[in-house]
Amino acid sequence: MAEAARYFQEMKRKGAEIWETFVDDVYRNQRKTLIVLGAGIVLALGFAGLILFSQRQIKASLVDRMAFEQLPSENVQPLNYLTADHTIKQTKAISVMFSQPHGEALDQVYQLIADQEDELNRTFYYYPIVYDTGIFVDTYQIDPNKVTFVFYEEGVEKNRFTFDAFDDPETEFIPELNRLPMWTIRSLDEDE
C-alpha cells in the first residue's frame, strides 16, 4: 500500500512538472502558441467543411445510382439532387415528377411511358424523394408515397396531379402529362 501511495505521489509530482513546463512554454512563446492554436482551428474547420461537402456529394451519388439508372425514356430527365430546388425556382417553366425511387406506382408510370413514348410530347424532370421527406412535404406539399407531377412557372406552382388519381391510367395518364404545362387552359375550363 505504501508503495502504491508513493507511486501515485511520484506520478502527481511528474504531472505537475509537465504542466508547469507547458505553462511556462506557453507564456514564453505566446506567438508560437497562437500560431499553432490558429492552425489547429483552421485545420479543424477545414476538416468539418470537407465532411459536410462529402456528405452532400455522397448523398447525390447515391441518389444518382438509386433513381436515375432506370429512367424509361429520354423524355424523363434527372434533376440534379444538389441543385434541384434552385433549378425549380430559377427555370422559366419546368415540369417535375416527384416520387420515391421505388414502388409499384413508379414502376407503372415507367411502364406506361415506355409503352406510349411516341405519344409523349414533352420532357419532364424526375426529382426523387430519398432524403428529408419532411422538406418535400413542407416546401412542395408532396405526399412522399405518391407519384406527383407538378408544373412550375418561374418557381411558382401552376398545375399538378398525382398518378393515383386516374381511373384508367392506360388511357388518361399520358394525355394528362402532355397537358400539365397548360395551366392557363385548365384554369379557364374550371371557370366555366
Image (cartoon, rainbow, N blue to C red):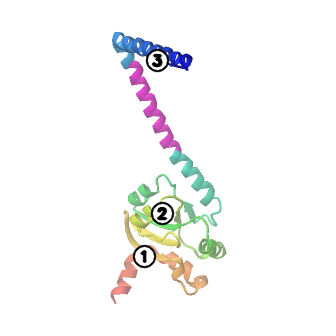
Closer to the chain start, of discs 1 and 2, is 2
| Residue position marked by numbered label 1 in the rendering | 182
Which residue is more in the foreground, 142 or 30? 30
Residue 53, x across and y down, in percent: 49, 42
Q: Secondary structure at mark 1?
A: loop
Q: Where 162 sits versus 60, above or below?
A: below
The magenta stretch is 35-54
* Alpha carbons under labels 1 and 2: distance apart: 28 Å
* Alpha carbons under labels 3 and 1: distance apart: 81 Å
Amino acid type shown at disc 3: Lys
Q: Where 62 sits versus 113, above or below?
A: above
Q: Is residue 63 magenta?
A: no
| Residue position marked by numbered label 2 in the rendering | 133
| Residue position marked by numbered label 3 in the rendering | 12
Amino acid type shown at disc 1: Met
Give the residue at the far bottom of this rendering: 192
Which residue is more in the foreground, 89 or 3? 3
